[in-house]
Image (tube, helix red, strand yellow):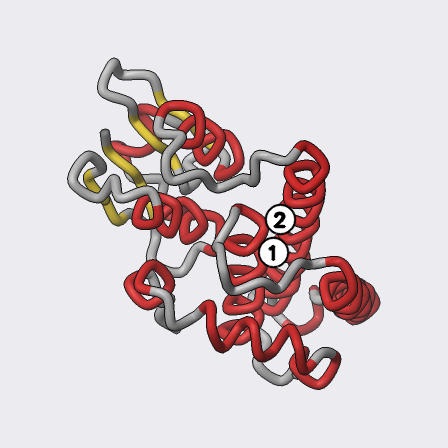
Amino acid sequence: MKLYTSLTSPFARKVRVTVIEKRLTDLVEIVVVDPWASPNELVRINPLSQVPTLLLDDGLPLSNSETIIDWFERQYPIPALLPNDENLRTQALAIAALTQGLIECTVAIVLEHRKILVQQSPAMIERRLTTIDRVVDTLAIHFDSNTSHFYLDGIGVACALAYLDLRIPERDWRERSKQLAAWQAWAIERDSMRATQPQP
């Protein structure tokens, strides 16, 4: 298998962390690309030119981090990234979806800041920042910050908060939740998170 990725994409990072957590590094070749440059190798298998894209051994390309992680979970169920209990599983999926939205909000701000100043929308940026604050507050209440496991929801939280630190460091989310900050300090020391540390 080949995993097309960039070293800063938080969406791709979730998949790279999954590969390590599921001990599949020997089965997955990491191919670093710049999706914004629409490289032929990536566009040929994914016309969206997006990362992550996983090219399966049978030639089928999978795009979207959630789709790829779901495939890994079904094909390689051990170690599991979701709890067995149905209620806990649903809760973990709900948190994972929330973190996906948190990443999307952060990416939207990053892209807005890349525009020339006169084309930027301060109102949109502020709206996204307010949304980020709301999501962090919700995670502080509903995320199970248990250090006895690192499920899909935890991967999402860890990657989303790390991306906030990378791209919008002035938004000090740690002040909103000491407990979440303490959990993140634990999470970023995991081998999978250290190995996929994004670069500015």
**Three-letter code for the amino acid on which mark 1 is drawn:** Ile
**Residue for point 48% across, 49% down:** 11
Tell me whether the residue at label 2 lies in contact with that at label 1, contact meaning CB atoms closer than 8 angstroms. Answer: yes
Left or right of 111 in this view: 187: left
Q: Quadrant of residue 199?
A: bottom left
> How far is the residue under mark 2 from the one under mark 1?
5 Å
Q: Residue 148: image x %, image y %?
A: 49, 60
Q: Which element carries disc 1, helix, strand or loop? A: helix
Name the residue carrying label 1.
103
Kind of residue at disc 2: Gln
Work out whether 27 lies above or below 113: above
Which of the 4 quarters of the picture holds residue 82? top right
Closest to the observer, 24 or 146: 146
User: In the visual, does 74 lie left or right of 142?
Assistant: left
Which quarter of the rendering shows the N terminus? top left
**Residue under numbered circle 2:** 100
